Amino acid sequence: MSTGVEPAIGLRPVVTAVGSVHDIGSEAWNALAGPDDFYQSHEWLAAVERDNTAVPRYLLASVDGRPAGALPVYRVEYEATPAYQSGRLRRLLGTTGDFLTAGARRCYHSDVLLAADLPEPAHDQVTATLVRDALRHAEQHGCAGLGFFYLPTATLLRLARLFRVVASFDDGESVIEEIGAGLDAYLARCSSKLRAKIRREQRIFAGTGWRTAITPLDECVADVARLVSEVERRHGGSTPDFLLRRLFRRQARSVSHREVVFTCHDGENRLVAAAIGYRWRDTLYSRSVGLDYTRTHGSFAYFNLLVYKAIEYASRNGLNRLQLGLASPAKVERGAVVRPLWMAMVSDGDPGLWLCGEQAKRNWLEPYRRYSHAFPEGAWNDIVEQSLAIPGKERRGR
């Protein structure tokens, strides 16, 4: 079968495929994962692997015996989360046929892992080798290609230099940068309006008299699952408490040394709010928030745990970024910036980028335009124009 172009560089990556991430040393795997790659860290993949709804395959590319790149690939047998369901990908991309999920699963950011010390042409070579192997695996299972969720722009463009890519805007990720000096330093560089807003929300929360702490996840799994389930129901989700308890126990077993769980108890020692995060490189990743809405309404518990307590924790523990997951205007209103993430179907054939849903992306962006800081320089450049830089390619759209 045709599998795209062969990058012009003399590397000969060798791919090893295993059925469990435990068959690859965590040190070797994690050396490939950068600051944005917590959801493809060895520990997180181990937690996801405990989920028996998919059959994983982990591809590790080596050059001269050194790890050069990695890519998890999943044959998903059942998907309960709407964001990752095959029907959503096919609907947004206008494609047909089954696919293997590639990159991170249960994530807010995915990628092809690449050794940072390799030059850019070598990144293309390693990516091509990994994806080519994954496409062969997909073909063996009767699949049309590989489905990626929540890809950054640079990776989408790299894939399009090498393979046929049909893509659509998926969502945005929200990040607060440069928080290592603490909340006061962060507020000092904010506008006076934002400073006043945050101070007011802190005062209202402090006025409740509720107790906050950092609590091991395995000590509060049942209560946290109940509160997270309540938040999901409020936003249209339907994950029952018992499934969330199972999920959090898996995370506690695999990622406990990285977990940071901010908890809030009322005067009767009832858990009324919680925010689960994970430390990775210089970043604190916010994963889940749970709230008892009957108790926390008007208290600003959500932002105090998710943002303000998290910034204070980061400054005390040598961290400098807060990754807040998928974007919302409320997060941006409190200082986060937004970067685009893409959904893509990668298949063999002539390399190039076919884009769908540009109007949907423009509609999504509209609520954020009122915030002058929302879009980092260059992050939202026209991806069609960027794709023109791919040698020999013409502008393509759907």
Image: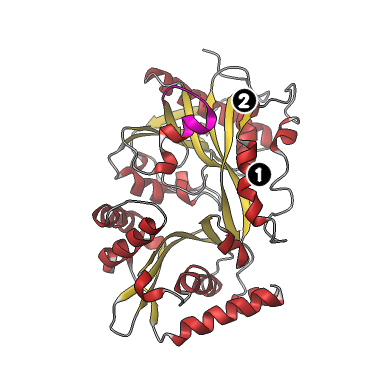
Task: Decide: is 393 above or below 207.
Answer: above
Of residue 370 and residue 166, the one placed in the foreground of this image is 370
- Amino acid type assigned to the residue bearing label 1 in the image: Arg
Mark 1: secondary structure: helix
Of residue 251 and residue 339, the one placed in the foreground of this image is 339
Q: Residue at x 60, y 70 (%)?
A: 180
Range of magenta residues:
89-98
Say whether marks 2 and 1 touch (CB < 8 Å). Answer: no
Q: Is residue 23 left or right of residue 172?
A: left
Q: Which residue, given by chain and number where applicable, does mark 2 sit on?
A: 162
For label 1, the crowd category at 10 Å Cα-Cα, with few meaning under 14, some 14 to 19 and many 20 or more, is few
Task: Decide: is 389 above or below 220.
Answer: above
Q: Residue at x 29, y 45 (%)?
A: 50
Numbered label attached to residue 362: 1
Task: Tell me residue 287's x, y (percent).
Answer: 44, 58
Whether residue 92 is in magenta: the answer is yes
